[in-house]
Structures are given as structure tokens and as C-alpha cells.
Image (cartoon, rainbow, N blue to C red):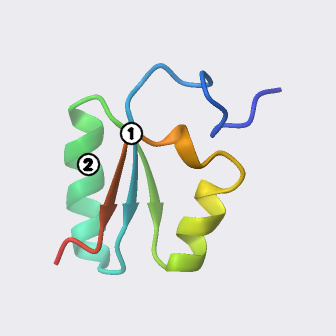
Amino acid sequence: MRNKFEKGACNMHRILLVEDDDSLIDGLHYALQKRGFAVDVARTVREAMEHLHPFPLSYHVLLLDVA
């Protein structure tokens, strides 16, 4: 079984959203998914690092604390 972060596991463009404001997370997550992106959310740096390990190049974009 492939890890969801493994290269080639998903054909969509992947975004890691690192944000601690729930209202921003909800709006951004919805808007990005609606436009066809696969979005993972991390609320802390520690969570972001867990998403990035062991496949740091699996994301096309990192969105960091947008407000």
C-alpha cells in the first residue's frame, strides 16, 4: 500500500496548508479543493514536519500562516 505522501501516489497538485486560524483553514481548504487541489492541513510546525517526513518533495506548494 502506498503512503499518501509518496511520489506518484496522487496525480493532483498537492498543497500543505500550515495555519492555526480555523476560519482561514475552512475557507482556504474549501476554495483550494474546489479548484482541484489536494490539501493537507497542519496547525503547528510540528504537524507540518510530520506531513513532510519522510517525503518532503511530495508537495507542490506550502502555504504558511497566511494572515
Rendered residue at 58%/71% (across/down): 47
Residue 20 position by quadrant: bottom left
Q: Quadrant of residue 8?
A: top right
Instruction: Residue 60: give its label.
Output: 1
In the displayed structure, 22 sits above or below 63; it is below
Between residue 53 and residue 16, name the one nearer to us. 53
Q: Residue 52's spot in the image, x, y percent?
A: 59, 56
Q: Quadrant of residue 51?
A: bottom right
Disc 1 marks a residue whose amino acid type is His
Quadrant in which the N terminus appears: top right
Give the residue drawn at x 62%, y 25%.
9
* Cα–Cα gap, marks 2 and 1: 18 Å
Horizontal side, residue 65 vs residue 62: left or right: left
Specify which label sits upstream in the sequence, 2 or 1: 2
In this view, 10 is above or below 54: above
Report which residue position mark 2 lands on. Answer: 30
Q: Residue visible at 16% across and 78% down?
A: 67
Q: How far from the left and from the top, in percent, is residue 63?
A: 30, 59
| SS class, disc 1 | loop
Q: Nearer the viewer, residue 63 or 24?
A: 63
As drawn, the label of residue 39 is none
* Coordinates of residue 28 in the picture (x, y in percent): 23, 56
